[in-house]
Amino acid sequence: MKVLVTGGGGFLGGAIVRKLVGRGDAVAALSRTATDWHARLGVAHVAADLTDTAAVARAADGCDAVIHVAAKAGVWGPFAEFHRVNVLGTQSVIEACRRVGVPRLVYTSTPSVVHGGSSLDGVTEAAPYPAHFDAPYPATKAVAEQAVLAADGPTLSTVALRPHLIWGPGDPHLIPRVLAKVRAGKLRRIGSRPVIVDVTYVENAADAHVLALDRLAPVAACAGRAYFITNGEPVELWDFLNRVLAIHGLPPVTRTVPVWAAKFAGAVLETAYRLTGRTAEPPLTRFVAGQLSTSHWYDIAAARRDLGYAPAVSVAEGLRRLAAAPATN
């Protein structure tokens, strides 16, 4: 089939592109810049702004499906920037699919759309959207996810996937952030209780997108639904991070700060940065404090049932692969 992948030059988007090419699909990648490996694999590159519906429609014309991975991620920044990319950009992709008759849309969401600051222990997709978010990223992704699911219908089938904490060799986001904070002496455990979280090896997340793509149709069980995607083996957050740090020759994080102190510090820092007009990310935010101090792991039974999803790379195997390629992080 012919597939357009937005964000096809990124970490997850690139993994999806390579899987599609590997099985013989014709793939176009819509992203800000082309990469050398796109040309080597015969992947067409489209440089376009997500909010330019006409440009997205031209890129999607003739495609059997769109996998919409591109997003503005982060824990800090002006709400308007997140809204433009995540909400308006997603609305543009939906409209482009309708305009040129693309029948399938797979959307990359995030479990953060149901995280309101409290622990989530083995929850299913029945978990509601919270009334309040501590950061613009989950707030705008929740709006975008709802728009994608509402767009499902006879001529455009849609599905949303919520992969959690994607990692692996070449990760430009999660692992480098942790390494940088540890090297700067700025990472502390928050609270003294175990924090249980789900993580997702990048190839497993890519597999889930391809499976959803293949099963998506107007009568499919997955049409119009959201699915949690994880490795299916929750880990203790600080144990996992310390194993990653050991791979990179760094000491474990052992020093702790109370949860209340971390959340208070995050609120104070956010206020100070806003009042002074600083655009850099604060050392700590309420969202980060909440993510590091609460458990968040999910029931993936629905993805196993409706998508045929079965994580192929375990956490242990993922760590082995990460150790074999430490220079990439």
Image (cartoon, helix red, strand yellow):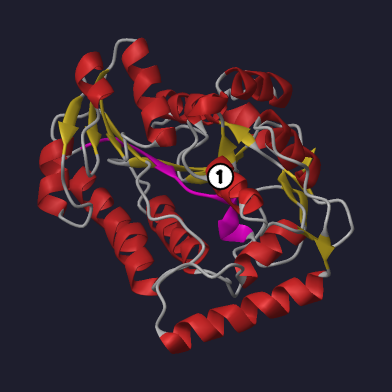
The N terminus - image quarter: top left
* Image side of residue 114 versus residue 237, left or right: left
158 drawn magenta: no
| Residue placed most toward the observer, 147 or 111 | 111
Q: Pinpoint residue 40: horizontal percent, then vertical percent.
A: 23, 15
- In the displayed structure, 244 sits above or below 310; it is below
Residue at image position (47%, 32%) is 220
Give the labeled residue for mark 1.
174
Total marks drawn?
A: 1
108 drawn magenta: yes
**Which amino acid type is shown beneath numbered disc 1?**
Leu
Q: Pinpoint residue 24: horizontal percent, then vertical percent.
A: 30, 10
Residue at image position (15%, 37%) is 59
* Image side of residue 243 versus residue 60, left or right: right
Q: Quadrant of residue 279?
A: bottom left
Residue at the far right: name it. 193
- In the displayed structure, 290 sits above or below 122; it is below
Residue at image position (47%, 62%) is 137
* Image side of residue 158 versus residue 96, left or right: right
Report the span colored magenta. 102-114
- In the displayed structure, 3 sits above or below 54; it is above
SS assignment at label 1: helix
| Residue placed most toward the observer, 272 or 294 | 272
Q: Pinpoint residue 306: horizontal percent, then vertical percent.
A: 58, 30
Q: Pinpoint residue 82: horizontal percent, then vertical percent.
A: 37, 64
Pointer 1 local density, CA inside 10 Å: few below 14, some 14–19, many at least 20 = few
User: Can the viewer see residue 169 in this picture?
Assistant: no
| Residue placed most toward the observer, 245 or 88 | 245
* Image side of residue 254 versus residue 172, left or right: right
Residue at the far bottom: name it. 275
User: Can the viewer see residue 181 in this picture?
Assistant: yes
| Residue placed most toward the observer, 93 or 28 | 28
